[in-house]
Image (tube, grey):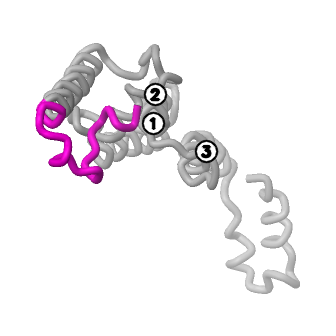
Amino acid sequence: LEQRFAIIKVLGNKKTTPNRAQRNLDLTHDKWELMGELAQVFKPLEVATTLFCAEHHVSLSDVYPILVRMRITLTPTGYELPAIRHVKEEMKRQIEVRWNMNTIDTSSPLLLSAVLDSRFKGMDYLDTEKVKRVKSHIARICAEDLAKLDQKESEPHHKMRKTEMNSWDIL
């Protein structure tokens, strides 16, 4: 879009575009406007891609909240052109399908890492049902690990292997 006038100038130049049919390839004002609106629709995708592909400070716990925000951003407002509405709906649908956003998989690393990350303590990006189910899953994992740890501690010390780890070892 920034190059619109340069494109028009090149297409209109007889030296760079000798064929008369090629000189008429310029887009109409409506098409340029549509491209501008599409660029705005794709902007959150550009930002998310930049964040996910960063070389430093990339965190799995960032993914789910960013995806939720993208879904909110891609919700049609009703004021856009039908083509823009269709693109938004399809992008939103693809995010939901590809990232399993409509199911509650409590063992999903995306959900677990987001819930455990203190930066997202408010969890406004998760509905109450997901929060309860994920916290319940985390509590169940911790209880199982505690039971295993208690069992191993009651065994003679020489039977414990140093290579075995549980969730409490990282704390």
Q: Tell which of 74 and 27 is nearer to you.
A: 74
Which residue: 23% across, 27% down?
A: 142
| Residue occupied by mark 1 | 61
Between the C-alphas of marks 1 and 3, the distance is: 11 Å
The amino acid type of the residue labelled 2 equals: Asp
Examine the structure image and report whether residue 162 is included in the region drawn in magenta. Answer: yes
The amino acid type of the residue labelled 3 equals: His
Q: Tell which of 144 and 151 is nearer to you.
A: 151
**Camera sees residue 145:** yes
Q: Considering the image in quadrants, where does the C terminus appear?
A: top left
Examine the structure image and report whether residue 17 is included in the region drawn in magenta. Answer: no
Q: Find residue 57 and name its label.
A: 3
Q: Tell which of 40 and 14 is nearer to you.
A: 40
Q: Is residue 151 above or below residue 1?
A: above
| Residue occupied by mark 2 | 117
In this rendering, position of residue 38 left or right of residue 62? right
Q: Are marks 2 and 1 in contact (CB under 8 Å)?
A: yes
Which residue: 31% across, 49% down?
A: 98
Question: Which contiguous range is marked in magenta?
Answer: 151-171
Question: Earlier along the polypeptide chain: callout 3 or callout 2?
Answer: 3
Which residue: 69% across, 49% down?
A: 29
**Camera sees residue 38:** no
* Residue 119 % position (x, y): 53, 23
- Under circle 2, the secondary element is loop
Question: Earlier along the polypeptide chain: callout 2 or callout 1?
Answer: 1
Q: Is residue 20 above or below residue 148?
A: below
Q: Tell which of 68 and 93 is nearer to you.
A: 68
Between the C-alphas of marks 3 and 2, the distance is: 14 Å
